[in-house]
């Protein structure tokens, strides 16, 4: 019944638009019956159209049904002949390529170059417009892309010979509609943060000190304090700034007065920013602020920015980084800045500041650095003595234990600190009491403290100040880490007169050897630890001698004077000419 | 600079497009034709910079327009140089390889005449097309926003504007293009310039029913994704405070 109803309309449509059916093409379709070959129009009207046979080489009924599902009339050719505008895609009816004969280039030869171009307006067609109301579906059913397509189709067809990719075909329509790009966001919080941060920075920043965190207890923060103490004396107050781009950063109120410099953090403006956003924010801050010197004191975001853009930054600013150790974990997987960042930016940084010589030697050897690149490494030992300009020896305490067989373990609690080794030592020395002090940082992998399950181990946890610890209650200091640079806690134990038993990792051997303490071959050499602790118990005078020698090294390398001297020798670290 | 005898100075920037300039110049010719029909006087200049041999030869042999051979390869500098070489009250820039819709010039000039403010006029739609017809990934459609329709800080993330525009000469003379800085990675002078316009509250608006076509360059997009092409410092970012 439906076919009978629609057939007259199809017949009328084919009369109005006879070129829709290309008879020769339709006759020659495979397996054409006798009466299709003899009476193609009639066969198409009565049968072929309803079996979705294609009437024209450029017209696929099935493709049309697939591409334009909102067409209501079936077969699709019925839409095509009755309401072609509704298809929104009419290569058959509208594709009228520029004739191929003759030279299509209307550009005149360059014989004379007129200042004003003369074009005959009569040759020009009217500008394309969006199709009007006639023959167009109601506005509500149209999309933005429909309007664009109409514009495109009318305009691009003229140039489709010269630029064939813009021929308005179904393929192009599909491709374009598949990639309609969003406009800019109406609101961009990330870049608002950039603007707000920029407004908080002083007008001119000569030295930007980038920290991973402030307010989290650890050697890294104490090192930052020492650097800032040095820098404060060398820059006007508003030319030195601390920036904290990392998510981990948090600090207590009053930190600015404690450090004496402006501290600006992404967390204050956008605490939920992900790492990629933090990187983009820092990048824009550096591009716009362009401080003469940027010192990355261990910020992951800054390392990322330096790795990607150190070459771009280095034209405007001198870049410095701190480097302490080469960390590998588990199955020797290389992690950290040494392996994954330094080799890719060393060319463009001005200086790598290391707290131990071992890491410098290792980097030069591992990466096969030239003399020029090797010269960028500077040994800047962490200052511990004479911080206020006083005699560094006044900070030293002699070895005078009040109690025997008591050891101190003091460090940040982390997986690489090897508390499992500590437990093994305690098991081997049941008469020795070991006190464990230290905080667990959010940045560190969780450590199962249940490993410390022996009665002679007492976990004391975090401590506020080293001077509050009952240091004279201990006769030795045990250090069990397997990845280190120059551990501050070890230096502090030495300063407070404790003989040190530590493994030969990182730069520890620069301060501890057989004359200044007890250096064991590796962090899991439990027997060597046990022997050393027994020796300390048995020969307290020898322990006192070694402590005194270790303290001499502290005075030599870890005083504020040495620190200042080391930094003064780093080319470009202080931008004196801009003061 | 020559006396101002033209209403619009059209500048086509050619560098390494070779004979692909043919489509560009045809689109310029038909857009200029519409403008002439509307009673406007138009001059056309082809600015050649960092050109390969094919491009230079094509311009020499096939282009009937005045050519400016610019030394150096910095697009920002060449844009400023071309501006100084033209005389029209309005200027319209188009990159080689790109295409205007037939009506862009005439409609943009009409909009500028109707609107009494200083506005940089953009096509309403920017359509990307592939060199290879069958490469579907090269096609894209972007509706160009008016500068009042989005948060200005979002331009720091991406450039919503195509390279082509029509504007009063005095706008471009006041806000000249920045120079490329390859060492610093600030090589997208158009993006940078757009950010500067926003920072100086210069309005950018679209001309209804006009189109800009551009050749998609996968390499360019990838470079931007990798972050090697970045926006330089902008007045906008300076927090409305001038630095250095």
Image (cartoon, coloured by chain):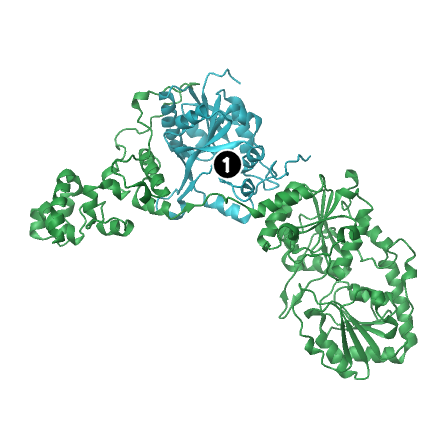
Chain colours: A green, B cyan
Label 1: chain letter = B
**Up/down of A356 relative to B36, above or below:** below
Q: Assign the N terminus of chain A to one quadrant of the image.
A: bottom left
Residue pictured at 46% horizontal, 26% vertical: B115
Viewer-side residue, B180 vs A344:
B180
Q: Position of residue A135 (x, y in %)?
A: 24, 38
Residue B153: image location, x then y, percent? 56, 42
Answer above or below: position of B84 versus A236. above
- The answer to whether residue A549 is left or right of residue B40 is right
Q: Nearer the viewer, residue B206 or A186?
A: A186
Decide if residue B63 is on the left or right side of residue A53. right
Q: Is residue B38 depicted above or below B121 in this figure?
A: above
How would you rate the neighbour count of disc 1 (Cα within 10 Å): few for under 14, some for 14-19, many for 20 or more?
many
At horizontal 42% and vertical 23% (from top left) the residue drawn is B65
The residue singled out by tag 1 in the image is B147
User: Can residue A56 be seen from the camera position used here?
Assistant: no
The correct choice, above or below, for A367 with respect to A508 in the image is above
Along the line of sight, which residue is nearer the eye, A550 or B164? B164
From this viewpoint, is residue A373 visible?
yes
Instruction: Classify mark 1: helix, strand or loop.
Output: loop
Q: Quadrant of the C terminus of chain A?
A: top right
Does residue A440 appear left or right of residue A99 in this picture?
A: right
Residue A137, position as x, y percentages in the image: 28, 41
Return the x and y of residue A104 as percentages of the image width and height. 31, 29
**Left or right side of A537 for A462:** left
Quarter of the rendering containing residue A139 = top left
């Amino acid at each position: 019944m439906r076919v009978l109803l629609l057939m007259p309309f199809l017949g009328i449509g084919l009369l109005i638009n006879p070129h829709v059916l290309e008879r020769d093409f339709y006759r020659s379709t495979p397996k054409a019956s006798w009466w299709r070959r003899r009476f193609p129009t009639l066969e198409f009207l009565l049968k072929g159209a309803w079996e979705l046979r294609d009437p024209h080489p450029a017209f696929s009924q099935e493709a049309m049904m697939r591409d334009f599902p909102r067409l209501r009339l079936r077969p699709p050719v019925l839409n095509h002949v009755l309401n072609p505008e509704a298809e929104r895609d009419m290569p058959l009816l509208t594709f009228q390529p520029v004739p191929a004969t003759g030279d299509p280039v209307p550009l005149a030869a360059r014989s004379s170059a007129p200042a004003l171009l003369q074009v005959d307006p009569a040759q020009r067609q009217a500008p394309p417009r969006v199709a009007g109301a006639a023959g167009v579906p109601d506005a509500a059913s149209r999309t933005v892309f429909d309007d664009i397509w109409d514009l495109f189709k009318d305009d691009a067809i003229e140039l489709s010979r010269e630029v064939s990719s813009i021929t308005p075909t179904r393929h192009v329509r599909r491709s374009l509609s598949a990639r309609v790009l969003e406009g800019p966001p109406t609101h961009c919080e990330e870049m608002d943060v950039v603007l707000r941060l920029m407004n908080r920075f002083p007008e001119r920043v000569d030295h930007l000190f980038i920290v991973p965190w402030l307010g989290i207890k650890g050697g890294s923060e104490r090192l930052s304090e020492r650097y800032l103490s040095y820098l404060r004396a060398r820059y006007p107050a508003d030319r030195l700034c601390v920036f904290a781009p990392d998510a981990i950063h948090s600090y207590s109120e009053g930190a600015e007065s404690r450090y004496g410099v402006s501290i600006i953090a992404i967390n204050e403006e956008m605490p939920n920013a992900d790492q990629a956003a933090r990187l983009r924010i820092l990048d824009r801050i550096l591009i716009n602020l362009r401080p003469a010197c940027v010192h990355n004191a261990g910020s992951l975001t800054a390392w990322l920015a330096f790795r990607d853009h150190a070459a771009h930054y280095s034209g405007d600013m001198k870049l410095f980084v701190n480097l302490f150790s080469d960390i590998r974990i588990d199955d020797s997987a290389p992690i950290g800045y040494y392996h994954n960042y330094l080799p890719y930016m060393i060319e463009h940084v001005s200086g790598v500041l290391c707290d131990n010589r071992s890491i410098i030697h290792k980097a030069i050897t591992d990466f096969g650095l030239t003399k020029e690149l090797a010269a960028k490494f500077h040994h800047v030992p962490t200052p511990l003595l004479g911080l206020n300009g006083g005699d560094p020896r006044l900070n030293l305490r002699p070895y005078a234990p009040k109690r025997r067989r008591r050891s101190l373990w003091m460090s940040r609690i982390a997986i690489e600190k090897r508390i499992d080794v500590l437990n093994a030592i305690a098991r081997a020395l049941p008469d020795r009491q070991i006190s464990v002090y230290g905080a667990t940082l959010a940045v560190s992998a969780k450590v199962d403290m249940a490993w410390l399950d022996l009665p002679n181990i007492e976990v004391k946890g975090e401590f506020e100040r080293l001077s509050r610890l009952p240091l004279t209650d201990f006769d030795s200091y045990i250090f069990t880490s397997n990845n280190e640079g120059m551990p501050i806690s070890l230096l502090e134990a030495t300063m407070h007169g404790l003989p040190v038993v530590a493994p030969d990792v990182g730069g520890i051997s620069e301060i501890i050897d057989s004359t200044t303490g007890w250096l064991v071959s590796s962090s899991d050499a439990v027997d060597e630890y046990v022997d050393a602790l027994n020796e300390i118990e048995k020969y307290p005078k020898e322990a006192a001698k070694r402590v005194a020698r270790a303290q001499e090294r502290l005075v030599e390398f870890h005083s504020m004077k040495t620190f200042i001297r080391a930094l003064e020798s780093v080319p470009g670290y202080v931008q004196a000419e801009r003061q | 600079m020559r006396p101002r005898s033209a209403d619009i100075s059209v500048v086509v920037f050619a560098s390494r497009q070779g004979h692909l300039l043919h489509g560009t110049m045809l689109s310029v010719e038909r857009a200029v034709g519409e403008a002439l029909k509307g009673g406007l006087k138009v001059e056309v200049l082809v600015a050649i910079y960092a050109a390969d041999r094919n491009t230079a030869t094509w311009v020499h042999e096939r282009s009937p327009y005045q050519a400016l051979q610019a030394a150096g390869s910095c697009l920002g500098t060449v844009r400023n140089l071309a501006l100084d070489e033209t005389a029209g009250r309005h200027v319209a820039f188009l990159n080689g390889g790109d295409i205007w819709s037939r009506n862009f010039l005439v409609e943009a000039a009409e909009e500028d005449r109707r609107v009494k403010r200083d506005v940089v006029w953009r096509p309403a739609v920017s359509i990307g097309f592939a060199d290879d017809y069958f490469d579907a990934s090269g096609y894209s459609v972007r509706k160009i926003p008016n500068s009042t329709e989005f948060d200005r800080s979002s331009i720091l993330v991406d450039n919503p504007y195509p390279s082509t525009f029509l504007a009063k000469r005095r706008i471009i003379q006041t806000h000249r293009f920045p120079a490329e800085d390859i060492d610093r990675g600030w090589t997208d002078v158009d993006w940078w310039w757009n950010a500067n316009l926003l920072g100086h509250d210069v309005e950018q608006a679209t001309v209804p029913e006009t189109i800009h076509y551009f050749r998609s360059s996968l390499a360019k997009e990838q470079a931007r994704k990798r972050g090697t092409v970045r926006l330089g410092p902008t007045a906008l970012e300076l927090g409305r405070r001038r630095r250095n």
